[in-house]
Amino acid sequence: MSDQGNFVAEWFGHRVYPIVSRHPSASVDQLAARCPFLSAATREDRQCIKSAAALGVCTISSSSNGTRQDWLVCPYRAVDPLLILDVVDRLFGVEPAPGRVVAPGPTLSQEDVRSEILARTAAGGSAVIFLQDKLGGEISLPRTPQSPELSFDITLVEVRRAESKLDISQYGILEVQTMDFHGSYRSAVQNLQDALRLHGEGFPDALAANSRWLRENVEGPNIANVFKRTFYQMMLKFQIGSLESCAGCVLALPQSVWDSWQRHLGAPELLQRPDGDFALKRPGTESGEHPPAWIYIFDIDTETEASPSPIVIRKRIATDADSVGYFALKVAPAAAVGQSGSSGLVTDRIKLRLSRWWPQLWRALAE
């Protein structure tokens, strides 16, 4: 069977392409339309919040970068303890004993969570509470005459005890970049729902034998639009990450999105840092010990038998707004208009286009 095209890769958190998960929790979540990621974060069952046309779709498998990769289409897929805890340690530093509590905002209503935070902070430790759209709500900055309205994907709030009272010491920002796809997943979602209803326990076998159901009318990623829509917001938040009250900003990109953005950033060469991480820095500048911004490159680990598949961090890249702006607004445009090669690339293309209507013009302009 052909593997050409774009396929729904994870449905309600569990793999359906290129293999079909047979983990017992897969059928439980799919039958209940349950989101395993929101459910794990809030410690209570939560259904998928996506519209009917995209219900349950977490990732799309596409070869738009030349090789088949998973593309995240739901931000809640990235609410993974490994990613959240790593970002917390990166922004606020590793907390020595007695350590810290990390929890989403809605769990503050639970008595055991409140008790743990009070005990940990009383002993000199800390708590980090994170807020997201469906996990307590986004934190937004209102527009002003000189700035636009701005919302943070995930706000990380560090809480410590000061003079016997709990207080916010710092906050951090975590942005998770998903990918938009052209068209709709409606047909593939309907196929999945029908197959689950009709085949019951035989659903994994039926799906494995009919992977075409997963690609029906699923179009490719809208790479250029996502970068253009994201870039300005990314620059603003990286700049906010440099403020004294902010512990920093992390932009978490799936490996597929990072690969697709290389042309938009002038295919920059990453510098190796002494700590094993990387740096994206404007030439002539240093990354410093505490950079205001980080780009995390992550992927879904499909090599394990766990379901849902865990997230694995591929790279951590220290950067700042000025450096990202340099590569996106100076290096990439210079390459686009041929300043590093043929300086007449733009004018050559103009001449070629005009010659369609006036063939003699090309010869006249060349003389």
Image (cartoon, rainbow, N blue to C red):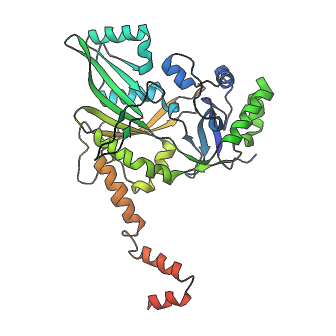
Of all residues shown, which one is farthest toward the left?
Answer: 163
**Residue 9 visible in the picture:** yes
Location of the C terminus (image quadrant): bottom left
The residue lying toward the viewer, choosing from 155 and 116, is: 155
Figure quadrant of the N terminus: top right
x and y percentages locating residue 254 in the rendered image: 49, 40
Please name the residue shown 36% across and 27% down the image: 156
Where is residue 238, by image quadrant?
top left
Q: Quadrant of residue 295?
A: top left
Residue 104 on image: x %, y %: 43, 21
- Which residue is outermost to the right? 198
Q: Looking at the image, is 272 positioned above or below residue 225?
A: above
Q: Position of residue 216 (x, y in %)?
A: 71, 45
Position of 127 with respect to 47 (left or right) is left
Where residue 237 sits in the image (x, y, percent)? Answer: 33, 41
Side (left or right) of 32 relative to 316: right
Residue 45 left/right relative to 199: left
The residue drawn where x is 50% and y is 41% is 178
Residue 279 shows up from this direction: no
Q: Residue at x 39, y 71 (%)?
A: 341
- Toward the viewer: 215 or 304? 215
From this view, report whether residue 258 is shown above or below residue 102: below
Furthest residue toward front:
145
Q: In front here: 81 or 230?
A: 230
